[in-house]
C-alpha cells in the first residue's frame, strides 16, 4: 500500500477532510464557451473571512488545498491568501488560466512553495484556443506564463478539456506540453451549469468518438488494461464507497457554501452561518452522502461495471438521483470496454449510445 493510500484510509477512518477545494471567485478574465459558472460577483467572502476559513480548515485536518475560480488571480488578495495558506502548512495547488502571471508572479509562487499550478490550454492553435476563451491573444499570454513558471522550477499541469471545437488538437497540446516541460491531462468533460442549465452540453464530443482517445497509449498508457472487461463484483466491492466526495474531500464556493465536491452541487451548509467543522460533522446532507455504499445504488449495484466504473455521484445528482446511474459514466464504461452497462439497459434496452445529459468524464482525467 502506498503512503498516499495509507493517508487516505486513515483520514476516512477518522472522518478528516484531507482535501479541500476553495474557489476564491467566480469572476474571470476569460469567457470560455463551456464554463459552468455564473461570473457575476454575488458577494464573495472577504479576505478576513477566507483567512478565518483557512484556519478552520487547518483545525479540521485539511492538508491538500486547491485554490481556484473563476480566475483566482483577479482577486487583489490572491497572493496574500496563498501566503496565509502556506504559513498554515497546506499543500497548495493553484488552478488558473495564467494570463495574469508574468515573471514577478512566477517568482512569488515559487517563493511561496506552491506545489503545482494547473492551467487550462484548449489548443496549440491561437485561433482555436482564443475562440474558446473569447479573448484574443489568450493562448500567447498563457504559454508565456507557463514558460515563466517552468523557468522557476514550478510544476505545471496543462489541462485540456475536450470539446467539439478542439477535438483535433489533442496531439498538438500534448506536444506543446512536452516542449514546455509541463504535465498534460485530457478531460472529455462538459458538465451542466451549476444552476442545472444544460445548454453547454451541445459542445460535447459524441461518446462514440471517445473510443479513439481511450485506445491511445500516449494518453492512457496500457490500453489493454485500461479497456479490459470489468472484474467480477463481490460483496467487498458492494460495501465500498462510491466516491471520496464528502468523506475525505469537500468544496467551498466564493460565497461560503459547502458542497461534497465542485461537481456535486448539494448545499450542505454555509461557513458564514456555521463553523466549517460543524458543517463537516453535523450536516444532514453530508450524512446522507456518507451513508451510501455501492450496494445502495439504484441500478448500478447490479451492474457488471460496479467495481471499475468511475461513476460520479455529483453528475448522477444533477440527473436527478445521487443514488442513480450517471449517463456520462455509463457511456464511458461502455466505450472503454465494449460491454453494456445496467444503466444503459435500463434506459434503452440496448447498447446504443444515448444522447445523455452529461459528457463522459474519466476520473481522474487521462494523463501522460
Image (cartoon, rainbow, N blue to C red):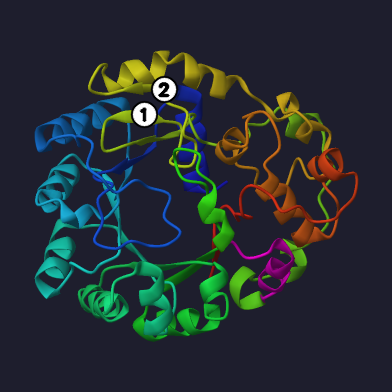
Main secondary-structure element of the magenta-colored stretch? helix
> What is the residue that sits farthest to the front in this orientation?
199
Q: Image check: 203 left or right of 144?
A: right
In the image, the segment drawn in magenta is 204-216
In the rendered image, residue 234, in percent from the top left (x then y), is placed at 82, 34
Give the residue drawn at x 34%, y 46%: 38
Please state which of residues 64 and 13 is positioned toward the viewer in this rendering: 64
Give the residue drawn at x 36%, y 29%: 258
Q: Image check: 216 left or right of 99?
A: right
Q: Is residue 211 magenta?
A: yes
Residue at the spot of label 2: 268
Q: Residues within 10 Å of mark 2 (few under 14, many from 20)?
A: many
Q: Image check: 47 left or right of 348?
A: left
In the rendered image, residue 340, in percent from the top left (x then y), is placed at 85, 51
Residue 268, picture quadrant: top left
Give the mark, 1 or 2, whose residue is nearer the N terminus.
Answer: 1
Give the residue drawn at x 69%, y 49%: 356
Report how far apart the C-alphas of labels 1 and 2 lie in the structure.
Answer: 5 Å
Q: Is residue 71 above or below residue 288?
A: below
Q: Is residue 157 visible?
A: no
Residue 279, picture quadrant: top left
Q: Is residue 176 above or below residue 77?
A: below
Please state which of residues 11 and 101 is positioned toward the viewer in this rendering: 101
Q: Kindly indicate whether the residue at mark 2 contacts the one at mark 1 (C-beta within 8 angstroms).
A: yes
Residue at the spot of label 1: 258
Amino acid at each position: 500500500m502506498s503512503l498516499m493510500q495509507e493517508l487516505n484510509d486513515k483520514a476516512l477512518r477518522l472522518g478528516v477532510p484531507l482535501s479541500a477545494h476553495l474557489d476564491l471567485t467566480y469572476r474571470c478574465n476569460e469567457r470560455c464557451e463551456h464554463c459552468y459558472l455564473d461570473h457575476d460577483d454575488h458577494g464573495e467572502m472577504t479576505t478576513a473571512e477566507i483567512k478565518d476559513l483557512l484556519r478552520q480548515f487547518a483545525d479540521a485536518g485539511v492538508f491538500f488545498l486547491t485554490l481556484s475560480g473563476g480566475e483566482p488571480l483577479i482577486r487583489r488578495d490572491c497572493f496574500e491568501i496563498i501566503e496565509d495558506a502556506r504559513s498554515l502548512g497546506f499543500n497548495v495547488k493553484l488552478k488558473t488560466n495564467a494570463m495574469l502571471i508574468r515573471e514577478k508572479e512566477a517568482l512569488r509562487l515559487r517563493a511561496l512553495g506552491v506545489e503545482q499550478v494547473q492551467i487550462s490550454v484548449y489548443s496549440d492553435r491561437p485561433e482555436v484556443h482564443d475562440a474558446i476563451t473569447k479573448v484574443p491573444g489568450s493562448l500567447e499570454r498563457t504559454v508565456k506564463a507557463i514558460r515563466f513558471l517552468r523557468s522557476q522550477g514550478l510544476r505545471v499541469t496543462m489541462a485540456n478539456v475536450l470539446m467539439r471545437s478542439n477535438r483535433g488538437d489533442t496531439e498538438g497540446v500534448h506536444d506543446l506540453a512536452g516542449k514546455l516541460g509541463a504535465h498534460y491531462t485530457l478531460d472529455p468533460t462538459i458538465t451542466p451549469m451549476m444552476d442545472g442549465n444544460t445548454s453547454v452540453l451541445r459542445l460535447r464530443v459524441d461518446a462514440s468518438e471517445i473510443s479513439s482517445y481511450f485506445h491511445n497509449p500516449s494518453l492512457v498508457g496500457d490500453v489493454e488494461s485500461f479497456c479490459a472487461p470489468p472484474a467480477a463484483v463481490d460483496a467487498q466491492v458492494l460495501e465500498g464507497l462510491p466516491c471520496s466526495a464528502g468523506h475525505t474531500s469537500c468544496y467551498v464556493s466564493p460565497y461560503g457554501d459547502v458542497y461534497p465536491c465542485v461537481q456535486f452541487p448539494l448545499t450542505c451548509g454555509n461557513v458564514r452561518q456555521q463553523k466549517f467543522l460543524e458543517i463537516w460533522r453535523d450536516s444532514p446532507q453530508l450524512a446522507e452522502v456518507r451513508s451510501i455504499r455501492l450496494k445502495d445504488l439504484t441500478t448500478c449495484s447490479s451492474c457488471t461495471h460496479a467495481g471499475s466504473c468511475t461513476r460520479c455521484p455529483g453528475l448522477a445528482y444533477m440527473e436527478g438521483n445521487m443514488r442513480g446511474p450517471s449517463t456520462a459514466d455509463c457511456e464511458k464504461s461502455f466505450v472503454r470496454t465494449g460491454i453494456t452497462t445496467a444503466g444503459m439497459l435500463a434506459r434503452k434496452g440496448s447498447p446504443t449510445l444515448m444522447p445523455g445529459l452529461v459528457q463522459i468524464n474519466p476520473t481522474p482525467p487521462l494523463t501522460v
